[in-house]
Image (tube, helix red, strand yellow):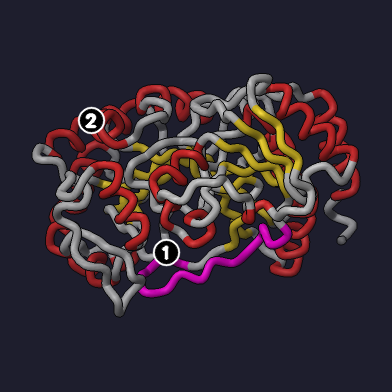
Amino acid sequence: MGSNFPSERLFNDAARADNKYMSRPARCFAPHQIILTKGSTNTPQRQQLAEAICRAYPKAEIQEQPNIHHNKVDLGVSNRLGLHYEGKRTLVLGEHLSSVRHSDEDGNTCPNYWHFSPYGFCPYGCDYCYLAGSRGVRFSPTVKVFMNLDEMLDRINTVARKRGRPMPFYLGKLQDGLALDRLTGYSRRMIRFFADHPYARMTVLTKSVDVENLLDLDHRKHAILSWTTNPPDVDRQFEPNTPSVGKRIQAMRQCAAAGYPVRAVVMPIIPLDNWRDVYEVFLRDLLMRVPLSRITLGGTCIYKPALQLVDLKLGRGNAISRDLQSPDIDGDRRARYAEGQRVDIYRHLIQTIRSIQPELQIGLCLEHTSVFEALGMTPAIGQCNCLL
């Protein structure tokens, strides 16, 4: 490690901060069992954090499975929907030895980037969840806390110093970035780390409203905070067990007031019967209340296993699934709405945004080049939420 980055001092400071942090139950999450898997308690610091997390949920059954990897926990449920819901009620503590990775998207315009995973999956209950059908979650759909955060930060330091210029590390690709932060206090360690680093920057995606751990930190604008948002009508219909959109906007305002760069990701856009009015009213409210540095729009784009789970939850012909086209086997194998419909939706939303904030940077998530071309947005390819 180079002399310009005092990582040893930083990790020691973070450890001392851990000793003072009091774990509190995470909002929207009350696990009925906590399973301690391989690596969860093999250092004094991990043991201390595991004990604190367990104390936060005194009614949860505690199981120790020290020889089982975090993704090999058997929940004893074979029914797919039952397994999904049981996983949402189970907290697994473990270690993730390949938690800092480079994405490998293809078949769309998404630029590949580095991401990291102090958590796995998510306690929230969104019906459209794309993660629920991903390979890493489908067979092990538990909510996870990985205890080896120091090793992750050490790896990030190595990668960023090798790159030698500012680069983002994304937290939110395979989890919600802040949903469990009340429980772990990880944000206080991560934001200090990125604030002190000459090159590494953090971008976070969340629906959480628990931002009190962030507000007093000297972040130096090295942490970019993004919220997934949708109109209240979408929230009420398709986002059970999540903080309300109104409370998310309040959290965004708090973080913007604390100097963080704040972004919004409006996704997945769902074409309700009155979608034009619903999204226009929502966007006007959001843009008038939150000083955004960027907004990214994204349609519903979902892999087949996740789509099957949507249909199990909501029934066939539901408002999410009914207009989806078959997955593009020559692209990224996600199901989407027809391209013409997506262009129509994006065009209306972009016109609404421009009428309120003409200079605000707008990106599109997981879209095709032809959509950017139809909207006259080809210069915006790669200017989306995950990057600096």
The answer to whether 106 appears left or right of 192 in the picture is left
Residue extent of the magenta highlight: 97-111
Query: Identity of the amino acid at label 1?
Result: Gly
Q: Residues within 10 Å of mark 1 (few under 14, many from 20)?
A: some
Calculate the distance from the C-alpha at mark 2 to the C-alpha at mark 1: 30 Å
The answer to which of 376 and 61 lies nearer the viewer is 61
Residue 388 at least partly seen? no
Q: Is residue 239 located in the magenta-colored stretch of the structure?
A: no
Query: Identity of the amino acid at label 2?
Result: Asp
Q: Residue at x 36, y 37 (%)?
A: 229
Secondary structure that dominates the magenta span = loop
Please tell me in which quadrant of the rendered image residue 338 appears: bottom left
Q: Residues within 10 Å of mark 2 (few under 14, many from 20)?
A: some
Please tell me in which quadrant of the rendered image residue 315 appears: top left
Q: Nearer the viewer, mark 2 or mark 1?
A: 2
Give the farthest residue toward the left.
273
Q: Is residue 108 located in the magenta-colored stretch of the structure?
A: yes
Q: Residue at x 77, y 34 (%)?
A: 50
The answer to which of 252 and 230 lies nearer the viewer is 230
- Residue identifier under label 2: 233
Please tell me in which quadrant of the rendered image residue 228 appears: top left
Quarter of the N terminus within the rendering: bottom right
Determine whether 241 is above or below 90 in the image: above
- Residue identifier under label 1: 382
Q: Position of residue 21 (x, y in %)?
A: 77, 25
The answer to whether 174 appears left or right of 321 in the picture is right
Q: Position of residue 362 (x, y in %)?
A: 33, 51
Contact check, label 2 and label 1, Cβ < 8 Å: no
Residue 96 at least partly seen? yes
Determine whether 351 is above or below 327 in the image: above
The answer to whether 139 appears left or right of 223 in the picture is left
